[in-house]
Structure formats: C-alpha cells, structure tokens
Amino acid sequence: MAENDESVPALLVDLCSGGLRLVIRRCYEPGRTLAVSWRDTLHGPKRTLLAHVVHVNNQGGGNWVVGCALNEALTEAELTALL
C-alpha cells in the first residue's frame, strides 16, 4: 500500500502499459510505492494508479526524474483512455 504522504505536483512525461515517468521536485528512493492521482477534468472523478519507484535521476534545479513500474499493468483500452 502507498504510504500516506502529502500531495506533490508532478509532470507526467511518459506512460506505457507497465510504467510511467514523472518529473517532480522531490526525490523518492527506489522501492517506494507512490499513489499517482489526477482528474480528467476539473470536476471529473479522481483516478489513481499505484506504482513503485524503480530509478531516480537528479536533473538539477531541484528537479528529479522518477521512473516507476505500475503495480498492475494497464490494458490497451485503459492506456488509450488515458492518452
């Protein structure tokens, strides 16, 4: 289960059926479980994916690239709906 933590804004830069990559202003250690949440529209339902951190790269300026593997792979239909 994801640890209860404060919300941290992130930029989703890559998404595939098995993982995602975020640019974020916080470093998370590999192995950490993250709950990645967003709304499709301002008042739409909140969606959440659970993922665990696989690798982290310091990009400088306080930015970190965090690569995560999804706990459950997305189906082709789910991936298409997200893109």
Image (spheres, helix red, strand yellow):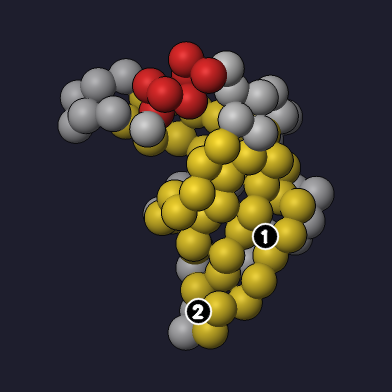
Q: Is residue 58 above or below residue 49?
A: below
x%, y% of residue 37?
45, 35
Q: Residue furthest right?
A: 31
x%, y% of residue 28?
67, 60
Residue 8 appears in the rendering: no
Residue 22 appears in the rendering: yes
- Marks 1 and 2, how far apart in space? 13 Å
The residue that mark 2 highlights is 62
Look at the numbered discs 1 and 2 and tell me whether their residues touch, using CB distance below 8 Å: no
Q: Residue 28 carries which label?
A: 1
x%, y% of residue 71?
71, 29
SS of the residue at dot 1? Answer: loop
Task: Please give left or right for residue 23 compared with residue 67 in the image.
Answer: left
**Quarter containing the C terminus:** top left
Query: How many numbered marks are there?
Result: 2
Residue at image point 49% right, 68% down: 25
Task: Please give left or right for residue 7 compared with residue 4 in the image.
Answer: left
Residue at image point 50% right, 74% down: 63
